[in-house]
Amino acid sequence: MSTFVYDLIGLSAGVCFILALKGLSSPKSARRGNLIGALGATIATVVIFFYAMPEKNGTPTSLPIKNLGWILGAMAVGTLIGVPAAKKVQMTQMPQLVALFNGVGGGAAALVAIVEYLNLGAGATTAEVIATVFTVVVGCVSFSGSIITFMKLQELMTTRPVVFPGGRFVIAGTLVAVLGVSGWVVSALGTTPLLILAGLSLLFGILFVLPVGGADVPIVISLLNAFTGLTVAASGYVLDSTLLIIAGTLVGASGTILTRMMADAMGRSLFGTLFGAFTAKPQEATGAAEERPVRSGSPDDVAILLNYARRVVIVPGFGLAVAQAQHTVRELADLLISKGIDVAYGIHPVAGRMPGHMNVLLAEANVPYEQLAEMDEVNPTFAQTDVAIVIGANDVVNPAAETTPGCPIYGMPILQVSNAANVIFLKRSMRPGFAGIENELLYDPKTMLLFGDAKASLTKVVSALKGL
């Protein structure tokens, strides 16, 4: 294959990545965009085996691929792990999978940069060394940070912010050490300082994510995703690969924009999201939740309340994903609409464990996209809403975000379901949300709690509603 044809095919793969990103900007075209991106990645992977370089006389010749057996073996192992994981993963665990895959991407970019640095040796230019250092630092931070976000989301460790005395100074000191060793690598051109740099960067990635509370983890995932994109772009410079530069730049730019949008949706600065735990005031204990009276009801009570409503807003949350109740919710909404009741879905930008989590769940149940209302659109309508049904959501409707300075979610814009005439909460228990704080709305006299699995509870509500 000639160099011209190789470059042309590489360009087509880059175009696929751009079209994929465009497709992912809308739920209606997201599936198509994902397939186009997969096609681009396949082209980029396969074409490298047919690459040819011109000899001195201009005649193209195939570039010998070393360690072909190891390469094919690694691809086989990756396929054997990736395909079953993608097929079997539950929607509730998708954010963890995204965090894990993102971390692997950052780690891979760092390893490639280290190997290329060893190959270049003393012949590396200053620009190549700087790009290598950048790739190693950001790639290692992305890898170790993503592992911590995975553990938080999987609840293998506490979801609360992890802080310790002098923590901010330890983080700052580690960052200074990373920058200092980076300069050492550029000036000394040695393997030892590069490996020390990788170790310090891995440590900084851990310290960087530990202070982040559970409710803010999706923002960190998006930020680390942007980091991975930047490492891929930098490694593309080191490897002289235009395709890697295109792909990495797209991921880095889109991840940065998404991070900024999510931080705005949380109503705080990115710095406050990452390090706010060091300045947050301790929360006073409010007593055991089970000792406070709540108003609970039965599926029949909920059905009667819904039957006489004129407008109902459904607020989905992580509990909906856990129960896989999206199809039952669609059935309930269709039944209410058939009775002449106005129904809408109130979607918070960071509901669930990743951006767009609820949109994906509802799209899986073929919920018409026109029925989904973003937070800014639906909030003014709660005052005219007869019943707000909160299914497994907690932090995104918690009034503490507006009334309790110093709490982990204070300042985050919320869905103002408390303005509705009646609120129905579907919960398994009185356990707090992912942020770990109590929701006073649960104790409001106009709030009715329906305990149990969301899917089972909604099925009973639908049956009761059909009998009215």
Image (cartoon, rainbow, N blue to C red):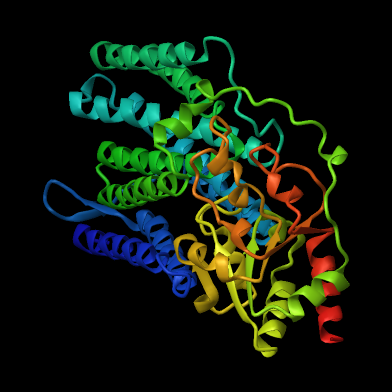
Image vertical order of residue 176 relative to residue 362, above or below? above
Q: Is residue 319 left or right of residue 79?
A: right
Q: Position of residue 208 (x, y in %)?
A: 49, 26
Report the quarter where the C terminus lies: bottom right
Q: Position of residue 316 (x, y in %)?
A: 64, 62
Q: Is residue 30 left or right of residue 311?
A: left
Report the quarter where the N terminus lies: bottom left
Image vertical order of residue 240 relative to residue 247, above or below? above
Q: How many marks?
A: 0
- Quarter-wise, where is residue 440 in the image? top right
Q: Residue at x 65, y 83 (%)?
A: 341
Q: Residue at x 43, y 40 (%)?
A: 223
Q: Nearer the viewer, residue 86 or 276?
A: 276
Q: Position of residue 135 (x, y in %)?
A: 35, 32
Q: Is residue 75 left or right of residue 231?
A: right
Q: Position of residue 260 (x, y in %)?
A: 37, 45
- Quarter-wise, where is residue 448 in the image? bottom right
Note whether residue 340 is visible: yes
Q: Residue at x 86, y 62 (%)?
A: 297
Q: Nearer the viewer, residue 464 or 220?
A: 464
Image vertical order of residue 191 relative to residue 151, above or below? above
Q: Nearer the viewer, residue 224 or 303?
A: 303
- Quarter-wise, where is residue 303 in the image? bottom right
Note whether residue 217 is visible: no
